[in-house]
Image: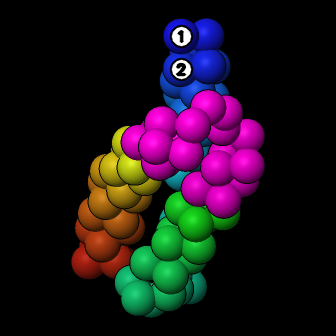
Amino acid sequence: MALIQTNKDLISKGIKEFNTLLNQQVFSDPAISEEAMVTVVNDWVSFYINYYKKQLSGEQQEQDKFLQEFRQELDTLSASFLEKYRNFLKSS
């Protein structure tokens, strides 16, 4: 049970850090294309997944479950961020 809580705490920390990263982004001219920003954000997601994957504990099935949940959360945050970026591109 302690391993599960440790993994939950770890994933929670990763989500907070990723959200902080997204919130620190400042949109300015000249802006990069939407496609380029999607690539950047996908790279960030991959980086976070790979970084936290190495720190998870427990059986492989448990780790896979946490990584899937982590990816879903990062994808949700990314979608919201990319929507803000699209709106920025439309307004500039």
Residue found 51% across the figure and 69% down from its top: 41
x and y percentages locating residue 62 in the rendered image: 48, 36
Which is more toward the observer, 27 or 51? Answer: 51
Q: In the displayed structure, would residue 29 be above or below residue 7?
A: below
x and y percentages locating residue 28 in the rendered image: 55, 71
Q: In the displayed structure, would residue 34 be above or below residue 81?
A: below
Q: Is residue 51 magenta?
A: yes
Residue 83: which numbered mark, if any? none
- Mark 2, residue position: 4
Q: Quadrant of residue 78?
A: bottom left
Residue found 37% across the figure and 56% down from its top: 75
Q: In the displayed structure, would residue 69 be above or below residue 37?
A: above
**Label 1 secondary element:** loop
Quick one: label 2, few (<14), some, or many (20+) residues within 10 Å? some
Identified by mark 2, the residue type is Ile
Report the magenta residues as a range: 48-67
Q: In the displayed structure, would residue 1 be above or below residue 27?
A: above
x and y percentages locating residue 85 in the rendered image: 37, 67
- Mark 1, residue position: 1
Residue found 34% across the figure and 77% down from its top: 89
**Label 2 secondary element:** helix
Identified by mark 1, the residue type is Met
Q: Is residue 88 magenta?
A: no
Task: State the predominant SS element of the stretch in magenta.
Answer: helix
Q: Quadrant of residue 69?
A: top left
Cα distance, mark 1 to mark 2? 5 Å
Q: Are marks 1 and 2 in contact (CB under 8 Å)?
A: yes
The quadrant of the rendering that contains the C terminus is bottom left
Q: Is residue 6 left or right of residue 84?
A: right
Quick one: label 1, few (<14), some, or many (20+) residues within 10 Å? few
Q: Is residue 28 visible?
A: no
